[in-house]
Amino acid sequence: MNAGGGSETTVRNRWLNRTTLGIGLTSLFSDWSHEIATTILPALLASLGAGPGWLGVIEGTADGLSSFSKLAAGYYTDRLRRKVPLVQSGYLLTTLATGALALATSAFHVLLARVSAWFGRGIRTPGRKALLAASVSPEAYGRAFGFERMMDTLGALVAPLTALWLLQVTSHNYHRVMAWTLVPGILAVLTFGFLVREKPNPRPAVASFWLSVRQLPSSFQRFLLAVGIFGLGDFSHTLLTLFAIQALTPTHGPQAAASIAAGLYILHNAFYAASSYLSGWLSDRVPNRRVVLAAGYGLAVGMALVLMLQPANVPLLAAVFAAAGIVVGIEETLEDSLAAELVSRQQHGMAFGTLAAVNAVGDFVSSFVVGLLWSRYSASLAFAVAGTFFFAGTILLLRLRRT
């Protein structure tokens, strides 16, 4: 959105424009679609005779390809005059590939469909973020990115409930449930096409990939270092669910513990959705938005300290899950907002792609290290190591100079 001639107040009041609304709704529908599939995927694989090994291979391969495709797509996005066709094609590929799970008759078919869907996610992400940043003034980056994350998380909240309802309606026919993912998926593609608008880029990038990386501002490179160090401790929050089950089983039994843990994860996602927009809104009203991100990083340090004490009661675990949700909401919203602020709009695609790649490496390493230390030694040691990386990332972030 161009502020041309309007006051700052007018710009701030118009941040929720056609494009930001369209991207937010698209994220809601798309996440609704593929999270239904994620909920049902283990059961579908089991019905095909495939076990946890296949699930690990499928999810690991899909996540890895998605990460590399985000980096490549970020570079390619900056070279385009118009980003909408690439982003919309990514949503279409994700929708069709997720729906193709309805035709799967073997674990290999599931692998092909899931990898294709996650490749679609990868190629659309940098362009979507660049379109979002281009549609608002820098003073509204926090609200715009927070709104998109909030809508995305609402889709993740609705999806498991929808999956449970579809299981009842289809008498646990997993293939028919997968076919229903096409409905919100197609809505995502149509919403994006009808609502999202862009101004063609008059100066597409022409530099090589490595030159494009080197041309990213030094302030952004230092920011990536802080994000990367923090990410080395930023383990998958599915490990929190496992921790809750193990902690509650002695007093509640395995079935009740699993049910409580599932409820705690819903609580986690609710705080994730709420904190996404609220942290973005707050960051637009403080002199330096990195302070809000640093507060989120600091909350992760506190979460790790509590986990080191091995909490085994529901109220304490609820506090941990709520804090974890807040951390993710702040982290995802403010990292994107700061990336958009530190880098010129002509380099936004490369910046978002690089940020996604750094986070992907952190996600893999942190979950692997925390899981290994937990298995070999203790959960306390695992979370202590994670907390150390959280603390180091927070200090590096606070030392960044304002540019």
Image: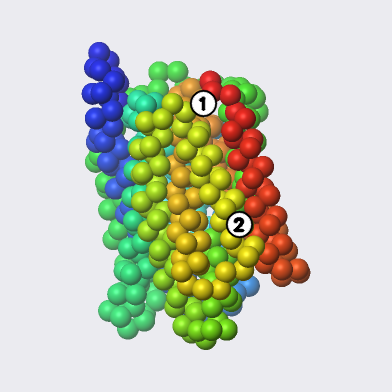
Separation of disc 1 and disc 2 at Cα? 29 Å
The residue wearing badge 1 is 342
On the question of residue 326 being in view, the answer is: yes
Residue 232 visible in this rendered orientation of the protein: no
Q: Secondary structure at mark 1?
A: helix
- Residue 81, placed above or below residue 277: above
* Position above or below: 177 against 400: below
Element under disc 2: helix
Image coords of residue 164 (percent x, y)? 34, 75
Point 46% across, 66% down: residue: 318
Q: Residue at x 40, y 65 (%)?
A: 266
Identify residue type, mark 2. Ala
- Quarter of the rendering containing residue 235: bottom right
Q: Is residue 330 left or right of residue 29?
A: right
Q: Position of residue 133 (x, y in %)?
A: 39, 31
Q: Which quadrant does the N terminus fall into? A: top left
Image height check: is 365 above or below 80? Answer: below
Q: What amino acid type should be assigned to the residue bearing mark 1? A: Leu
The residue that disc 2 covers is 304
Q: Residues within 10 Å of mark 1 (few under 14, many from 20)?
A: some
Q: Nearer the viewer, mark 1 or mark 2?
A: 2
